[in-house]
Image (spheres, rainbow, N blue to C red):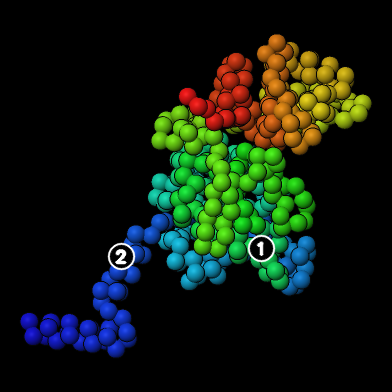
Amino acid sequence: MKIAHRTTALLCSFAVAAGVSLAGASAHADERKDQPEVAVIGTGGTISGVSTNRVSFQDYKSGQLAISKMVDELRPEVNGLAKVTTEQFGNKGSSGYSIADYRKLTASVDAALKKSDGVVVTTGTDTMEEFAYWLDLTVRSDKPVVLTGSMRPWTVIGTDAPANLYNAIKLAASRKTKCYGTVVMLNDEIQAAREVRKTNALRMDTFESGRSGVLGAVDQDNIRLNRAPARVQKCGKSAWRTPFDLDRIVGKVSAKESKPLPKVEIAYSYQDAGGEAIKAFADGGAKGVVTAGTGAGGISPAMSTARTDAVKKGVTFASTTRTGSGAVYDSTGTTGVIGAEDLSPQKARLLLLLSLAATKDEKLIREWFATLGTAQFTTR
């Protein structure tokens, strides 16, 4: 007993000498214990790029740095935000991933959210808006999912990469976007997956949400949210989840006989556009085609003829505009052609693809485009 007493006294003396009380140390340990857990999943992109030199802003190789190394370079600062773990899903440009890869990414995010309070996914910016909307439609958990990347590689002067990653972890750890679905965080701005678009090939403020505007911003210690996606109204209800449970629709990733997702393509309209692309898509096995039309979804006479023929073969179409804003409303009198309202062609493609995987009922697909694809706040 005397030895134990002396040991306790000695520890107290060391603590006092160091200017730290045992109570304070215990409180710090409890604080760490109560920290949120954030999983960071790396897929590559410019954010993990290595430049030729410190000023080669566009001259670099993407997908070179491991996500674990990138997160470690943010320590000890990131340790004050959350208990952060990392997973290397892949390490290449965003355009290098297939729909089958997307399906596996959903499984990885779902698995991570079972153990963590939020997930950050790093990816290339070229198709980040598609990565984000895919996860928004397929992830089953309502916990925060934050996508981030950068317009400059990790190793150049003035890179936006470390700050974007740090702020994305901060946002996920805050849990403020619970039930928002997937959001994108770059350039200090928070954007909804459904609306966000890459609008410039090189500038760091490339991501915008059109007339809808940003959700909010991360200003150092302050996370400000000014609006929310409409789906937050269903928070805590089973209706919050989309109909696109991939484990049920196509089978678990680990299953040997999981079904492939249907092929859906995009046909772009312009003056005197031919119908060959639509015909080729239909003949090549596409189950759906999105038309990026002029104005409110108009397509050329040749494309219209090809579309009519493809509908007879069982191909389903979604009609969008190439203008970048405005809506193409649905006309229920046109069999096989669904108005995608203000979804961009690339996002309408993902919604159509998942819809065709889940059902053959055109009426139901129309309903999903009108509600899920164009979610609005209700007063009821």
**Residue that appears at 72% across and 52% down:** 206
SS of the residue at dot 1? loop
Q: Quadrant of the N terminus?
A: bottom left
Give the amino acid at mark 2: Asp
Image quadrant where residue 49 sits: bottom right
Give the residue at mark 2.
Answer: 30
Label whose residue precedes the other's in the sequence (2 or 1): 2
Image quadrant where residue 155 sits: bottom right
Q: Is residue 359 left or right of residue 307?
A: left
SS of the residue at dot 2? helix
In the rendered view, tell whether residue 179 sits above or below residue 157: above
**Residue that appears at 77% across and 23% down:** 283
Badge 1 crowding class, 10 Å Cα cut-off, few under 14, some 14 to 19, many 20 or more, is: many
> Which residue is at the front of the view, 152 or 355?
152
Q: Return the residue found at the far left.
A: 1
Q: Is residue 104 visible?
A: no
Give the residue at mark 1.
Answer: 160
**Residue that appears at 72% across and 47% down:** 198
User: Picture coordinates of residue 97 (x, y %)?
Assistant: 65, 45
Q: Return the residue found at the far top.
A: 333
